[in-house]
Amino acid sequence: MLRITKITDYGFILLGYMARQDQDELHNAKDLAAAIGIPLPTVSKVLKILTQGGILQSHQGSKGGYSLSKDASEITAAQIIEAVEGPVAITDCSSAEGCERNCPISPSWQRVNAAVLGALQGLSLADMAGGA
Amino acid sequence: MLRITKITDYGFILLGYMARQDQDELHNAKDLAAAIGIPLPTVSKVLKILTQGGILQSHQGSKGGYSLSKDASEITAAQIIEAVEGPVAITDCSSAEGCERNCPISPSWQRVNAAVLGALQGLSLADMAGGA
DNA sequence: CCAATTAAGACCAAATAGGTCTCCTATTAG
DNA sequence: CTAATAGGAGACCTATTTGGTCTTAATTGG
């Protein structure tokens, strides 16, 4: 399959939504959930993860909320995926035992990995939010 | 994570092993399992899938076995992954409902997808088996 | 002090993946 | 022709991951 998880998908949707509005505006979890149609607890979870990953800034207390931590053009797809799912690595070949014994394939994987990562780094949130 | 499954990983190991030997030689599942150190039933399963995907040719009966269906240089990483896991698609954005309503992100995903696919198509089994 | 909102993490249920087993079919050696 | 060998197909169970919910604590504005 080679795909991202649903949580990551939600992350992209949420960030895309926020990117298409005033950068400094604070969005609280409840409004975002209502706007996008995803259950509140799940939205809350995604926002929390993105905050921990440095993509979002949070503001606690009443009248609090979330905002992008930097300009949408400086946030890449790679950063978002890494924030939610951890480092992008097609295979964990490097750490498996069987691999070191029998397959001299690892260097090739690293090339593929680099290509994938490059593609993801070349796409900013601004690109995604802008392109209809 | 964005990674391939273990079954796919085994597939690469098995194919890499076969590619590094005489192209016409038949390998039976038992010997391959012993050579690589993966349980026989699992090896058998992987070989079966690769055969269905057209990557391997099987030869039944006693003295039977498996061999590559074409030259290692004509088998790409993309083909192998697709044979085992189905079509390469980072996200199933296109079919989700929430997506169509609220995220204009799909076109961007398709670009990313194409980039990933290109990277995988540019890597042949011969490249992987050859590069130490 | 009180209400609103995020932070953190425990927790459960459903889906997926990994692996094993059983039975069936085909081919070849003798 | 028969028996042994090897692949073909798929059911099945288990473990892991994922998705989603809930509860409690911490923070801040009024």
Image (cartoon, coloured by chain):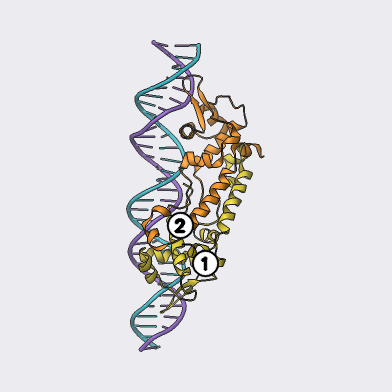
Chain colours: A orange, B yellow, C purple, D cyan
Q: Which residue is mark 2?
A: A106
Name above or below for residue A56 compared with residue D18. Answer: above
Specify the farthest residue to the front: B132
Q: Which mark is residue A29?
A: none
- The count of marks equals 2
Residue B92 seen anywhere in this rendered image of the structure: no
Name above or below for residue A129 compared with residue C6. Answer: below
Quarter of the view holding residue C10: top left
Amino acid at pointer 1: Ile
Mark 1 element type: loop
Q: Who's the residue at 47% across and 22% down the image?
A: A60
Q: Residues within 10 Å of mark 1 (few under 14, many from 20)?
A: many
Q: Nearer the viewer, mark 2 or mark 1?
A: 2
Residue B117's x, y, as percent?
Answer: 58, 54
- Chain on which label 1 sits: B
Quarter of the view holding residue D21: top left
Q: Which residue is mark 1?
A: B55
Is the C terminus of chain A in the top left, top right, bottom left or bottom right quadrant?
Answer: top right
Residue B4's x, y, as percent?
Answer: 47, 53
Q: Who's the residue at 51% across and 58% down the image?
A: B81
Q: Nearer the viewer, residue D2 or B60?
A: B60
- Chain on which label 2 sits: A
